[in-house]
Amino acid sequence: MIKINKDLIEEHGINEEEYQFILESLNREPSITELGIFSAMWSEHCSYKSSKTWLRKLPTKNSKVIQGPGENAGVIDLGDGDAAVFKMESHNHPSFIEPYQGAATGVGGIMRDVFTMGARPVALLNSIRFGDVSHPKTKHLLNGVVSGIGGYGNCMGVPTVGGEVEFNSCYNDNILVNAMCVGVARIDKIFYSKATGIGNSVVYVGSKTGRDGIHGATMASAEFDDDSDEKRPTVQVGDPFAEKLLLEACLELMKKDVIIAIQDMGAAGLTSSAVEMASKGNVGIDLNLDLVPCRETEMSAYEIMLSESQERMLMIIEPDKEQEAKAVFDKWGLDFAIIGILTDTNHLVINHHDQLKAEIRLDILESGAPSYNRPYKIIKEEEFDQSLIKEKNDLPLKILERLLNSPNLCSRKWVWEQYDHMVMNDTVFRPGGDSAIVRVHGTNKGLAISTDSTPRYCSADPIEGGRQVIAESWRNITSVGATPIAITDCMNFGNPEKEEIMGQFAGVVTGMIEACETLNYPVVSGNVSLYNETNGKGINPTPAIGGVGLIEDLNHFSTPHIKREGDNILLLGETNGYLGQSIYAKEILSITSGLPPKVDLKSEKEIGDTVRDLININKIDTVHDVSDGGFLVALAEMSISGNIGVKISLDKENINDKFLFGEDQGRYIISIPDKQMSEITKILNDKEIFFQKVGKAFGKKLIINNNEEVEIENLKNLHENWFNEYLEE
């Protein structure tokens, strides 16, 4: 019998006030198993105790939303009886400690969240962030994470079609690994996690339980320190081949009328799945841990309940359908064990070796979980005085070369080439554009999917940064001609017990709310990762947004690469040349102060809707949004990907670094043949969309006003070689 003492309570991440509530609720001291259960369920990772006050304010509905937050994943209507099921989650702490397995199991976990709802995964994306490129751990972590993502996804036969990578010193000791999965299901075959039916069987399926990942949820809810490597045992170990079997077995059983409820055993393992399923159904659940398939001997009740071994599911089925279900899992060579029963007690009851190890009222664990309205202070940078900027004497194309060969603007080709992005044969547009495009199998509809975040903006002004990250996602989905429908988010922040960090969270959510409402772009699923700090130093606020939109007809979509010589190049949206928080300011001027650019959501929507309409009526097929690096970087990317140059023609007053590299929001570059020029410019004028002609597609060079030129091939080499050169150093 383990004696509960103050040190043990602190070790489990439970504070004095929380422990007092446990004592009062149980009317006794908890057992060690019960303490572990409370620790897991009340962790930030599972309970959202510091964030749910704010998360409840986010818009979560529109006419296309079938299921919003609260389930394993969000669900939206794609028409014709099809639904997209998607979610993004973090695996930050494990990936820093053990990059390959941390990243791999992040991918495995997010796929289970999707196929547990009856959807076949069709696309994976990611949002990954590392420390400064000079930091001694960065190369090791980068290689490990990319290998882990590719290793798991490739083995599963699911394409990794997009993502983003950033390097910043704020992630030196806390990298971010956010994984997103999108699946497709029939609307009438969506499965949920609400357990119902007193007397129904609780069934464990999948791989056996081991000691890996114990306290994974609690570890993911705490800061790191100098001894973080000692937490390696809390990192889960993945087996993608076992998950492939589990995927096929679950989808096969889902074709039969057998499953009442189903949930992935993710963070906090058997504990969270049992508690959440029973709580949603307002029933009790009794578990006999003697019946849990274990791969290690003499595992305690505490270890079995808190293990985060991978590739496991919990199902509720009627007793008379047990054999039918078992036959499916036997066929796929997976464990199938009846480990409990639903009761009318509303209690979680755990028995092991003929001993009662835990008995807790479920409402204490779920609705009784702490909810903190933490004090906050929203801090933002001072106004950015652009008049103080002394522009470099370098020629614009020389600056462009430096930017294209910088860590945060260079091509991510080295990364995505390690992922199988064509498997399943439904990838319409591969990585490297504004959004990935994946065909809804057997139809002519397409899913447009992207991941986005701009942490430097959120750090400088959390509210403006929150607006911008939603607008950027919406713009990327729009750029390919899709109608943006909904998002999933992964909210990565530091220690919420600090007023300024909680202020970052509150500010970002406030900005997100405004943008989501204006753009009709609700949040349907997501995840919060707090305490991304080491020795008191936190990361930049990093809300990663996974956007999903629908292309109704794949005969009409757009890509960024220039397709024809002679096309007119138009820049849509006003350019004021704002350099605050721009990559130009950091890379060229070494300035990181100032506010980010403003986001005009009304203008954003007007211009975006017009661009989408032009794509859908087949008037334009070449579009790229202007974001990091500004106009000249975006234009260079279009030229490089299309292998066609541009003769840039600008008014003399616009040949300056502000115009060329400023990051004003709500802008697009489009390419138009001469024969359509008058018709399209009339549409733009009629809709009062500001635009200017900035050049013509021509040859194999980028030429500015006939004064300066560079070969596209040279730009391509600079753009695509940074990763190889960096990793070979």
Image (cartoon, rainbow, N blue to C red):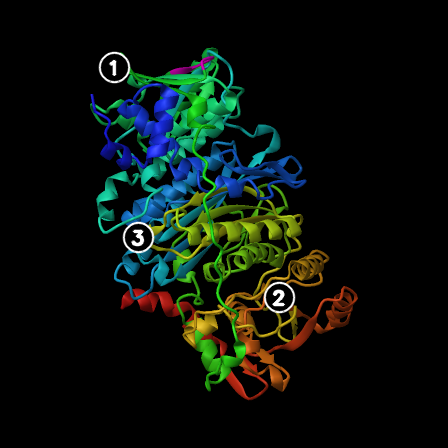
Which label sits in the foreground, 2 or 1?
1
Where does the magenta region start and end?
340-345
Q: Nearer the viewer, residue 360 or 124?
A: 360
In the picture of the structure, the residue carrying the numbered disc 3 is: 534
Does residue 700 show up?
no
Q: Is residue 537 left or right of residue 646?
A: left
Sooner in the amino-acid sequence: mark 3 or mark 1:
1
Question: SS at mark 3?
Answer: strand
Report x, y in % for residue 700. Answer: 53, 78
Sooner in the amino-acid sequence: mark 2 or mark 1:
1
Splitting the image into 4 quarters, where does residue 614 fall? Answer: bottom right
Between the C-alphas of marks 3 and 2, the distance is: 39 Å
User: Which amino acid does the dot numbered 3 rest on?
Assistant: Thr
Between the C-alphas of marks 3 and 1, the distance is: 41 Å
In the picture of the structure, the residue carrying the numbered disc 1 is: 353
Which label sits in the foreground, 3 or 1?
3
Q: Is residue 357 left or right of residue 700?
A: left
User: Which amino acid does the dot numbered 2 rest on?
Assistant: Tyr
What residue is drawn where x is 43% and y is 61%? 412
Contact, mark 3 vs mark 1 (Cβ under 8 Å): no
Image quarter where the C terminus lies is bottom left
Question: SS at mark 2?
Answer: strand
User: Is residue 343 rendered magenta in the image?
Assistant: yes
Whether 64 is drawn above or below 303: the answer is below
Contact, mark 3 vs mark 2 (Cβ under 8 Å): no
In the picture of the structure, the residue carrying the numbered disc 2 is: 668
Report x, y in % for residue 314. Answer: 41, 25
Between the C-alphas of marks 2 and 1, the distance is: 66 Å
User: Which amino acid does the dot numbered 1 rest on?
Assistant: His
User: Is residue 456 rendered magenta in the image?
Assistant: no
Whether 717 is drawn above or below 22: the answer is below
